Image (spheres, rainbow, N blue to C red):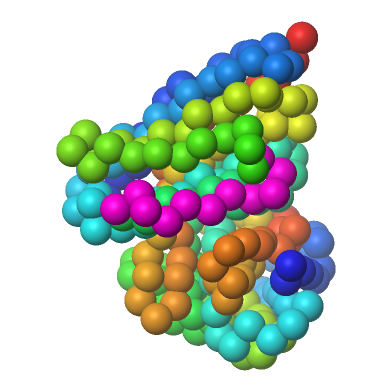
Amino acid sequence: QMQLVESGGGLVKPGGSLRLSCAASGFSFSDYYMTWIRQAPGKGLEWVSYISNRDNIIYYADSVKGRFTISRDNAKKSLYLQMNSLRADDTAMYYCARRVDAIHTWFDPWGQGTLVTVSS
Amino acid sequence: DIQMTQSPSSLSASVGDRVTITCRASQSISNSLNWYQQKPGKAPSLLIYAASSLQSGVPSRFSGSGSGTDFTLNISSLQPEDFATYYCQQSYTALLYTFGQGTKLEI
């Protein structure tokens, strides 16, 4: 059974940093692009970043470019998101998801999410 | 950026009803459109990919259609477990995936 489990969320002050992790199981992690998607409280979904299976292709949403860094460790079957210079509008549930590419692209499965709260 | 607009934003329906949710793209996205269901306090889960392909394990009462700019998600006979928020998402542009704002389906 495919599973993604995020961790690392918490309360951080504006300007602070946090590192999120996502542990994968049940599929060949090194074969797939992976992505982070976030959801502010009571709001919709916002794609944040993705990384190719060999980590040579990385893209970020403009809202996090220059502040967030996505990475992965295929040996550990883990995805990471280093978040620096955090702002109040980064407060959200952060989900990791597998990107499936088969002519078309979709996200499946998703992890249960980890909550990041940026507040003084 | 490709904007995705869902309608309605919220919808009240009853068990057994047939429901249609629409999603419109700001430019043609072929059939690069996915639908997700999110129940309260849970992560989204994939329902439909490539506009009309049903994800494995999803009940057949869910169906998707459309291409170009206009898409629909249909639920043929609402069940109690279907009350949730539904999101469309375009995968036409790999550099910026965008979601619709969501449609909350309430009893």
The residue that appears at 21% across and 34% down in the rendered structure is A76
The quadrant in which the N terminus of chain B is found is: bottom right
Q: For residue B44, say whether it is visible.
A: no
Q: Residue B4: x percent and y percent?
A: 74, 69
Q: How many numbered discs?
A: 0
The residue that appears at 70% across and 17% down in the rendered structure is A15
Q: Residue lying at the far top in this picture: please name it.
A: A120
Q: Residue B87: x percent and y percent?
A: 64, 62
Q: Quadrant of residue A33?
A: bottom left
* Residue B32 belongs to the span the image colors magenta: no
* Residue closer to the observer: B90 or B53: B90
Q: Is residue A64 above or below residue B51?
A: above
* Residue closer to the observer: B72 or A69: A69
Q: Residue A49: x percent and y percent?
A: 54, 48
Q: Quadrant of residue B14?
A: bottom right
Region of the chain picked out in magenta, as a range? A54-64
* Residue A55 belongs to the span the image colors magenta: yes
* Residue closer to the observer: B95 or A108: B95
Q: For residue B42, say whether it is visible.
A: yes
Q: Quadrant of residue B54?
A: bottom left
Please name the predominant secondary structure of the magenta segment in the image.
loop
* Left or right: where A119 falls relative to A38: right
The residue that appears at 49% across and 80% down in the rendered structure is B50
